[in-house]
Image (cartoon, coloured by chain):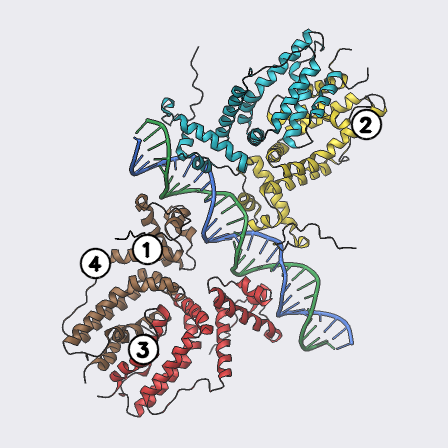
Chain colours: A cyan, B yellow, C red, D brown, E blue, F green
Amino acid sequence: MAVQKSTQPAPGKPAPDSTRRSEKSRRAIYDAALALVVEAGYAKTTIEGIAARAGVGKQTIYRWWSSKADVLMEAFLDLAEQSVEEAGSTPYAFPDTGDLAADLKGVLRATVDELRDPRFEAPSRALAAEGVVNEQLGRELVAKLMQPSLDLYIARLRAAQEAGQVRPEIDPRIALELFVSPLAQRWLQHTGPISYEYTDTLVDYALQGLAPR
Amino acid sequence: MAVQKSTQPAPGKPAPDSTRRSEKSRRAIYDAALALVVEAGYAKTTIEGIAARAGVGKQTIYRWWSSKADVLMEAFLDLAEQSVEEAGSTPYAFPDTGDLAADLKGVLRATVDELRDPRFEAPSRALAAEGVVNEQLGRELVAKLMQPSLDLYIARLRAAQEAGQVRPEIDPRIALELFVSPLAQRWLQHTGPISYEYTDTLVDYALQGLAPR
Amino acid sequence: MAVQKSTQPAPGKPAPDSTRRSEKSRRAIYDAALALVVEAGYAKTTIEGIAARAGVGKQTIYRWWSSKADVLMEAFLDLAEQSVEEAGSTPYAFPDTGDLAADLKGVLRATVDELRDPRFEAPSRALAAEGVVNEQLGRELVAKLMQPSLDLYIARLRAAQEAGQVRPEIDPRIALELFVSPLAQRWLQHTGPISYEYTDTLVDYALQGLAPR
Amino acid sequence: MAVQKSTQPAPGKPAPDSTRRSEKSRRAIYDAALALVVEAGYAKTTIEGIAARAGVGKQTIYRWWSSKADVLMEAFLDLAEQSVEEAGSTPYAFPDTGDLAADLKGVLRATVDELRDPRFEAPSRALAAEGVVNEQLGRELVAKLMQPSLDLYIARLRAAQEAGQVRPEIDPRIALELFVSPLAQRWLQHTGPISYEYTDTLVDYALQGLAPR
DNA sequence: CCATAAACGAGACGGTACGTCTTGTCTTTCT
DNA sequence: AGAAAGACAAGACGTACCGTCTCGTTTATGG
């Protein structure tokens, strides 16, 4: 199998030697970037500002990242990893108590909590906004940040199908959107308030169906 | 009765006289803004660029709008109105053939077409992205661009409730999200492809329920 | 001989009817222009500022004057006339007591006083500066503001020649510069302090060269 | 001994590191500034224009100079230095042939030539005009551009005093103005033509007054 | 005594330049 | 060689004025 060196942006550039990279600078840049996005918002966060706050030369940023969005995405991924480690629990776990509705409600309630955590909100919104307009970045975000979670929904739904709780012809990749997307949209587009009651209702409507029996 | 002077946002500025406003300039600015967003993207669209392309002084933009997003939102609203007028049909109509599923599928297919129309895509994405990060603008977008359409879904669903096709305790404002939000999210976040088949499936899943009968 | 129609600047313009001109506006413009030059300096005095302070439309300025320098020159000429009227004395008088040195010293001392009058200083400097760089305006200034005074020096010197106090071959137009120009340069270019003692000395030095041997 | 921190004008600004300054840019800015003043006049010379012509960012001008006048003054000083170097001769020399009148006439004729050199005229006028209105700049101009020359007049006149050609009680700093200021004023204010004959006459008239009786 | 035409105040307009800010590159110096 | 520092060319920002061009509103005859 061929070794893939994916992030070699320009063939004209000598490509920096990543083994000599300063770990301290990277950390400082992540911290500065996240702090600035939280404090001032994405638009007012500048590369110069990040460099200054991190006590780092601008070139050190341009050497390793290609854009402000790029820095922020890595910083956010790093933050997410840290949180998971801190939490101590298995990173990607999904409850399976046998009660599908309860399991989904629980996970969605946790998502609601996360969406409201101010530490996450500013960078998440910034990245999401960038992803709306920049398809490449958007796809990267989906792949790196969202897909792992969505895969767990799919797995849980498949289990439910095997247990006869969900009709077998249902495509779980679409079914999960019935509860996940409404929440996502309310949060992204400010189309409505977010609450446990709301997500519970979503699960109820979607799972039991809208039609009278 | 007190004289209401509602739109006096900044007490420092004398507030321009809108009766003297140049209609020609406004049109030119709308056209230039939309064209530039389509051609170069939102980030590379500048106020200077819009002014230059519209053959207008920068101050004429700053006199009437407060930001790039503001210009673009009005331009887009104007575009939407125009389209509606061109279409000739009633602006906000929703079919009611008695067959709820068919009606919803039809409307969603039309939405798919619209989301793919390149004339709409670039400015829509730009505005949506801005709305993600800028709550005030986001709410304005929702109120002015989305709510009218959503109200039609609500009305149609209420009619279906009266016809006994939807359980009466269902909240139509939430129910509509089951088909609308998944499509919105796929489009906004590039989480998946968009097709007639997909939206038809959404309606099927949501309407008939996920649980076996 | 050709008929000269001197003040018809642009043949395309209908030429305003000066009989209908608003005297009140003209006065207000003069006052505003002079006040602003004193308060803020020539460079920071703008046509818009003059119009606003005078409570006048910009067009009323552009209708009657061609430039900021033009407005200020007329305003200053008007001020000079007023002062002369207020003084009550004959506008252009030059003492002739028979003692040339004493007469010159007296007039130069009066000039020193005038150059120090803050009401005159700011607009005078502004106009002089403009005249340095704009030859046409410079020549106008000389002709309208300076020449009348200089002619009096010439007349006085000619009288002195007839009285045998100045050698007959001396050109009075040059001779007067021996006392006037040094004072002018010290004031204009800040090359030295201005005082009665200084102007007295100038007269002493210069007259020696003009007197018969 | 006290540590001198002379050039720290604004405590808010970090003060650029002059050792890293680009000599090429400075030269280009000087050349562009002088060329534009000659071609278009001072008023139509803009910082943007200088930057564009010099192939330089505007900030590079604002980093090192505080105003258009400031740029032009340095550019002109530089030009003056260059001219002196090109001439090869001692920069500040004043002939002393023993014949005071002849020496003065010679120097004044050279000054007439210089005042007519188009390379010098435009920037000189521009700076002089600025100096009329801006006392600080005016004093700087006098100190840097005029005083060195005037000192040579003073020295020559003192030598003449020692040689008994000028009365000992005469103040040379005032005496020199008798020939220099009339020429300066004619040039500055366009009060009259400038010629060798004129300056010769000035020397004749003035020296008579200074010579012993 | 009113009709009408001008000058007027106001200020929107297309522009130019301002002085500031940020970008991404380049260079210098230190480690 | 990587990094901190920061000068540089480029160019957009939002503001201030420019000089031109309408808008109604005085105002001042002259029919």
Report if the CB atoms under discs 4 and 1 are less than 8 Å apart: no
Q: Is residue C3 left or right of residue B65?
A: left
Specify few, some or many for label 3: CA neighbours under 10 Å numbering under 14, 14-19, or 20 or more.
Answer: some
| SS assignment at label 3 | helix
Q: CA distance from mark 4 to mark 2?
A: 97 Å
Q: Give the numbered dot on residue C198.
A: 3
Report if the CB atoms under discs 3 and 2 are less than 8 Å apart: no
Q: Say which amino acid is labelled 4.
A: Ala
Q: Say which amino acid is labelled 1.
A: Ala
Residue D210 in sight in this render: yes
Q: Say which amino acid is labelled 3.
A: Tyr
| SS assignment at label 4 | helix
| SS assignment at label 1 | helix
Chain where mark 4 sits: D
Q: Give the numbered dot on residue D87.
A: 4
Q: CA distance from mark 4 to mark 1?
A: 18 Å
Q: Is residue C195 left or right of residue B153?
A: left
Residue drawn at x 29%, y 51% as measured from the top left: D3
Chain where mark 3 sits: C
**Residue on which disc 1 sits:** D75
x, y (%) of residue A79? Answer: 51, 25
x, y (%) of residue F16? Answer: 52, 56
x, y (%) of residue A7? Answer: 44, 22
Q: Are marks 4 and 2 on the same chain?
A: no
Chain where mark 1 sits: D
**Residue on which disc 2 sits:** B158
Tell me the mark number nearer the camera, choosing from 2 and 1: 2
Specify few, some or many for label 4: CA neighbours under 10 Å numbering under 14, 14-19, or 20 or more.
Answer: few
x, y (%) of residue B136? Answer: 64, 39
